[in-house]
Amino acid sequence: MSLQSELESRKSEKFQALYGRMPQSMNPSLDTLLLELIAWLGFARACAHSARVQDVLLALQMDLQRMIGPSVIPQTGDFSSFVAGRTRWLEETREALECECLSRGFSELPGDTVSGAILDLLSIMTRRMSQDHQKQSQADSTVREYLERLPAMLFTLARYEEWQADPQR
């Protein structure tokens, strides 16, 4: 096998591992929504300046990836317990970030930084996508709760990212 065909094979395998070989899901429209959110979170993570924001966005991506398909459930516990635990983490992390930049106040309009504006846009898109999905199908109630809380986390991350960009303002 030539080097080029071996590289193409690996690239194809990685793509298939992420998107093509996912277990058959009971809810393919939810999986599509989660894949889209993972991609948008990756875009936001690539643009973020704060290492803490990048870490939180990566954790969110990993959470959503684990919610795709039934066989990606962690070995310890059932799916609902996993998602409920991650929802608690999401809320605790959001509250901690809010406390850190609460004294500064939140800007009323997005756009102080590119990364903050992307996170604001993603917050709105996530809320819309989640509402659209809920109208179309019934997701697991714990997944639905996670998706309902995700926009508030993204809004808070936008404020934190902007605060980190200019803490004196």
Image (cartoon, grey):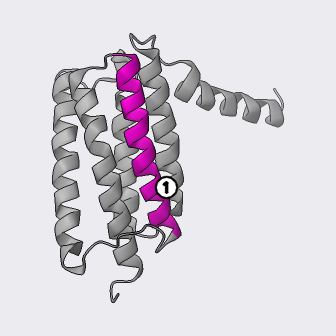
Residue named by callout 1: 44
Task: Give the side of residue 25 with respect to residue 114, left or right.
Answer: left
- In percent of the image, x 47 and y 54: which residue is there? 121
Number of numbered discs on residues: 1
- In percent of the image, x 31 and y 16: which residue is there? 138
Above or below, 6 against 60 in this view is above
Identified by mark 1, the residue type is: Ala
- State which quarter of the image contains the N terminus: top right
Q: Nearer the viewer, residue 126 or 59?
A: 126
Task: Give the side of residue 71 with respect to residue 21, left or right.
Answer: left
- In percent of the image, x 68 and y 28: which residue is there? 12
From this viewpoint, is residue 65 visible? no
Magenta-highlighted residues: 114-137
Q: Nearer the viewer, residue 79 or 163?
A: 163
The quarter of the displayed image where residue 95 is located:
bottom left
The quarter of the displayed image where residue 19 is located:
top right
- State which quarter of the image contains the C terminus: bottom left
Label 1 CA crowd tier, 10 Å (few <14, some 14–19, many 20+): many
Residue 118 x %, y %: 50, 58
Q: Nearer the viewer, residue 166 or 109?
A: 109
Magenta stretch, overall SS: helix
From this viewpoint, is residue 155 visible? yes
Above or below, 153 against 24 in this view is below
Residue 142 x %, y %: 21, 27
Residue 10 x %, y %: 67, 31
Above or below, 139 against 156 in this view is above
Query: Is residue 118 found inside the magenta-colored segment of the image?
Result: yes
Q: Secondary structure at mark 1?
A: helix
Q: Nearer the viewer, residue 167 or 58?
A: 167
> Farthest residue toward the bottom?
168
- In percent of the image, x 15 and y 43: which residue is there? 88
